Every structure is written in C-alpha cells, then in structure tokens.
Amino acid sequence: MDLPAIKVDHRDIEVQYSFSISHAAQRSANDISAEIQTGLERVEREILAGDDQAALLDQEIDRLTNHADKVDNLVAVGSGLLAGLVDIFWVGEFDFQRGKAWSNRTVNDFVMKTAKAQGYTGDRLDGAIKHLEGKFPSPTDNIWKGKDIGVSAKSHHLDDLAHHPTPLGLFFSILTQFTKKGYFQNGDGSFLPISIDEKGLELIGTDIPSKIFCGTVNWFFHLVSDMSGSNKTAGVGMGIPGPIVSLLKELSAIPGLNKTGLPQKLKEVFVKERFDLRSEMAVMHELGRQAMPVLLNEVLVRAFYFIRRLVAEVKAKGSFQNIEWKRTLPWNNRTIARMLTIATGTFTAVDLADAAIRAGMKSGGNMATFGVQLALRVNFVGIGRFAFAVYSDVSMGAQRGSLRDDRIALLSQQLHSQSAKVSYMQGDMWQAAAHTESALHGAEQMMQQAIEVSVSAWNADRASLRRIGEMKPNLDHHNPGLVLDIRDILA
C-alpha cells in the first residue's frame, strides 16, 4: 500500500520521500534481505555515477570561471596600450591607393612569371598577357557578343561564371566542356546558358581526360591571362573579379536573390568602381597591415598567460615531469578569454581615441569629413577581434550559469540517493535485529533443554548409585572380593 509522498523544500534543493507498506508477512526473511541488498547496491551505483558526473561538472565550471587576478588584468591593459601605440605610429590610416599599388605590382609580377614559365621570352606585360591568351583561350570568351543579353566587354568577366576564381567557377568551366554551353548571369539577375559557337567548339575536349584537362588547367592559365586586363589595356584594364565579389555574384544567381537588385549592384561595383581581383587584394593588404598590432596584442597576452601558469606549475610540482599542461595552455578557458577581452578592448579604445582626434583635426568641424577620416583611421580588424573576444567571454559565462544549474540539480539527486541509501541501511539493520532476536531465543531454548538434560542425567546417576548400594549384598554373595577390587581401582 502506498502512502502520500512527503516533499522537503529548502532554498534551491528539493527532496521528495515516498513510503509504502509491503506485506512482509507473506515473504521470507531471506527474500526481504535480498531485496534490501539489491536496492542498496543500485543506490550505491547511482551515487558513484553521480560523483563522477559532479567531478566533470566541477572541472567544466572551473574552466568557465574567470580566475584572472590583478596582475593578469594589468598585463592585458598594458598589452592593449602597446598594440595601440604600434597601430598609431606604424599602421596609420587605411590607404587604398597604397594597397592598390602593391596589388598591381604583385599581380603583374605573377602574370609575367607565369608567362615566362610557359615559354614567353619578352619583358613587356602586354606581351605576356597576349602569350597566355593565345596559349590558353577560353571557349566562352566572346560567345555573348551580338546576343543583346546585357553582357558587355567590361562586365563579361563577372557575368561569365566560368571566369570566377572560385570552386563554382571551376565547376562551370568543366560543365561547359560536357554541355558545350557557357553560363552567364547579367545585371538583371537572369541566368543565361549560351551555346558555344563553332570557333569555341575547337576548345572543347574530345574525350573525358581532355575535357577535364581543358576545364581545369586551361581554365587556370586563362584566368591568369585576365588578371591584369587584356593585352590592349595591360595593367590598367578590367581584370577578373576577386573571390569575394565572385562568391556574391554566385549567390545572387539563387532564385529569389536574383530579383533583389544584388546582381545590378555587383555589376556597378565591378564595372563603375572597377573593383576587381586587384582591388580585393588591395583591401586585404591594408587589412593585413591592420592585423599586425592585433596579432601582436594576441601573442603578448597568450604568452604571458602561458609563462606565468607554467612557472606556477613548476613551483607547485617541483619539476617539469608532473606538470598539468592543461592548466598552462592559453586557450579554451574563461581566464584567457577575459584577459583578451580587456586587451582588445583597451586596444580598440586607444585606436578609436586616436582616430577621433586625428579626424577632428582634419575635418575642421565638417561632420561628413570627420566621418570619412574616422573610418580611414579606425582599425576594423581590431574592432572585429574585440567583438569576438566579448562574444567568447559572454558565451562562456552563459555556459557556466547553465552548468551551475545542472550541478544544483545533480546535488538534489545525490541527496535523494543518499536518503534512499540510509533507508535501505535502516531496513538492513532492522532485519539484522530480527535475526539477532531469533538467535537469542533459540539459544535460550537450547540452554533450557541443556538444563533439563543435566538434571535428568544427575537424577539417573543418583538412582544408579542407590541401586549399586542396594545390590552390594548380592554382589558379595555371588562375586566374593569384587567390591574390594572396584574400590582399589577407583582409589
């Protein structure tokens, strides 16, 4: 029969006790003991499993807890200040023209080296481009002409998906070899498969190996020939789109996105702003310059964390052999996340302050000029790293809170299991008491029987002695001297 449950609620811990009355009289004592022992073993297994889980939770909670002290925070601030000074005096403002000069020089040198590797003997860039164009022509280069489909000489490198230096560009290049069609998307977002003309068919492979070769090797070298523009506009003409613009163009071909105005906007950026591969490289070059102080800040903070924890471990363990390396690694814990948040926040504050001061000095009170100058001076890589550091720190804090809730729930479960264990042990104790009572009762009965047997034996001995005395005259008569012999033996 089950009895109503009793619930005990103390602060955040809730324990519920359930009781039932079993018909023990219908079961043997051995059955009850076996049942108690089975329940006790089950509860002990649950407690051990809970202890293991609690240990793992404690480790995770400790990893997600900020243990940074005053020294850690001061070093993080100092690192951010130093990186900020490097950004102010070495990186300076974002200079697209400086990046463009570097990218033009880099791309032109690459085209020239590639052409020479393919047999070009001259020293002019237009000659190198012409050499590569003649050796590695594309079957889709001019098939758009005369079709009135919104593709022009300036935009065809963007509109022809096989002219994209991306995995999808390679896919369409190979697809062209098997379907004999070029695949375009104009500024209106229309997807346009165009059949290869008779001249272009000469550039289609005749079997699978030749198709794969033309779709890959020929595709790569043809893209190189287009990087610096055509041979008529070498170094200044429209090149191929960069990976970012190419990816956006490919995404704009998705149904739905193709009608959002994104294809037209990309065409304006590529054609009017002349934002091709060299422009993307120029931006990446300047962002790379901005990344240097950010990287310096990162290295300083992580190096300090590692060295300080390593020294502490060596002092605690006395040697390098017993070091817990996990405690020294400068990543994947809340302490290093907090230090990086402080360091990158300090760097960003210094950078923004410098940018605002310089922008104010150059703007002369003109807010539009102030905004432009501020944007040129701000280290966007640093801002991005600061945002990521804050996200990591906050995310770890949220995980810690969730794990603490799990730990409290586990504690409640462990208390319940411990209570059940006590109940089983009490039941076992009462079973042992019942066995003890039964054993004492049996011993008392045996003692009573022993007394009765002893009394009976004593009475029998006394009767035998009396009978011996009564039989003495007959013994002497029938066995002369026997009594004297027995007395001598007993003596």
Image: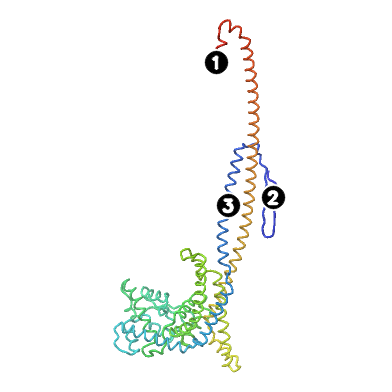
Is mark 2 in CB contact (under 8 Å) with mark 3?
no
Callout 1, which amino acid? Ile
> Where does label 1 land, which residue?
489
Q: Is residue 66 above or below residue 198?
A: above
> Where does label 2 land, which residue?
5
Q: Mark 3: which secondary structure?
A: helix
Instruction: Single out the mark in the foreground, 2 or 3.
Output: 3
Res. 394 image quadrant: bottom right
Identify the mark nearer the N-term, 2 or 1. 2
Q: Position of residue 326 (x, y in %)?
A: 50, 66
Query: From the viewer's perspective, is 227 left or right of 463?
Result: left
Q: Position of residue 371 (x, y in %)?
A: 57, 88
Rounded to the nearest angstrom, the CA distance separating label 1 from label 3 is 76 Å
Query: From the viewer's perspective, is 200 left or right of 319?
Result: left
> Where does label 3 land, which residue?
46
Res. 167 image quadrant: bottom left
